[in-house]
Image (cartoon, rainbow, N blue to C red):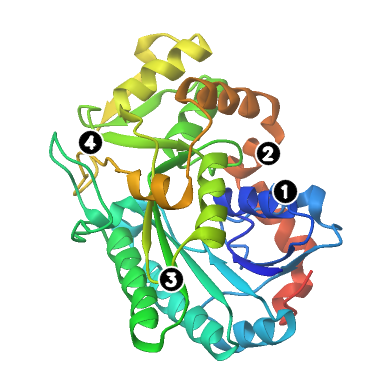
Amino acid sequence: MRILVTGGLGFIGSHLVRRLLNEPDIQVDNLDALTYAGNLANLADLADHPRYTWHRASITDAAAVEAIFAKAKPDAVMHLAAESHVDRSIENGMPFVETNVVGTEVLLEAARRHQVRRFLHVSTDEVYGSLGPDGYFREDTPLQPRSPYSASKAASDMLALAQYHTYGQDVVVTRCSNNYGPYQFPEKLIPLWITNGLEGKPWPIYGDGLNVRDWIYVEDHVEGLWLALTRGKAGQVYNLGTRNEQSNREVAQALLALMGLPPETVVPVKDRLGHDRRYAIDPGYAEKELGFTPRVSWEEGLRRTVDWYRTHTEWWQAVKSGDYLTYYRRHYAQLESGEHES
């Protein structure tokens, strides 16, 4: 089976590529533009793997995408490539519309033309909006996105499902809660705090710190994606979560204890514009239909994550300084001339 993964040099995508290559009969083609969130170091040890190929291209480049589909002839697409940081979307929403909406449509149309057997569209619980103190997001919860990022993801979800209803294209959508784990870009909450702690810097926390998220260890998420790809039903949405609600203050307290840091490390800052108060997923449908069962506890996942950042200082220091982008621009300049494969 040949699978085209988009965004495979990113945080979740790189974990997914590793998971797929554990299957002996899977060939992986990774379509990644290598923007700020992509990092060749995430899969450096797999660069010469006989069943792995990286294609450098933007999912918004229809001609490049067409050429990659024609060459790779994938049996399935697992679409993760996205602009995903809420704060960046508040500053400028246009890249989110271009990548998340236009790019998704480019991929869907290419997949339909090339008769790809299954298209897995990976989305987020943020498309549902904000919950009050009670209740859970279910697959039939109305979409009420409240940021440019989540609005662009909701639009891409609808485009994917429209392909199923209009053309009968085999499309499956997953919506996951907040991920954490190794290789996560340090602008996200948990790696930002861990790396700041290792540098002796304060931890900024929005507002009163009582915003609640359901957290899932990244390896559990990618296992859910594999199950959705192989067991999911066409036209269905599957929520992937762990019933692990934590406020930002609770996350901070757990990390402070693991890292042996004092409470004054946490410094309140002005709240994010339109900051959603609570997300909580009901994963019951995925549990029943896919056999989805997260295996990594919150405590174990945090411990693994802290240990990874402690022992991979070169990786995160290069990311936070921007040196990794300078390196890639110098050593992969030939790719800027139109070559799409490594």
Between the C-alphas of marks 2 and 1, the distance is: 8 Å
Residue nearer the viewer, 196 or 82 = 82
Which numbered disc, 3 or 1, marks the residue closer to the eye?
Answer: 3
Between the C-alphas of marks 2 and 3, the distance is: 39 Å
Q: Amino acid at mark 1?
A: Ala
Between the C-alphas of marks 4 and 1, the distance is: 34 Å
Q: Quadrant of residue 326?
A: bottom right
Is 131 rendered above or below residue 268? Answer: below
Is 295 rendered above or below residue 52? Answer: above
Q: Amino acid at mark 4?
A: Lys
Q: Amino acid at mark 3?
A: Ala
Between the C-alphas of marks 2 and 4, the distance is: 30 Å
Pointer 4 or 3: first along the chain: 3
Q: Which residue is mark 3?
A: 234
Residue at 69 percent of width and 87 percent of height: 70
Q: Secondary structure at mark 4?
A: loop
Q: Are marks 2 and 1 in contact (CB under 8 Å)?
A: yes
Q: Which residue is mark 1?
A: 41
Direction from residue 82 to residue 252 in the image, left or right: left
Q: Secondary structure at mark 3?
A: loop
Q: Which residue is mark 2?
A: 315
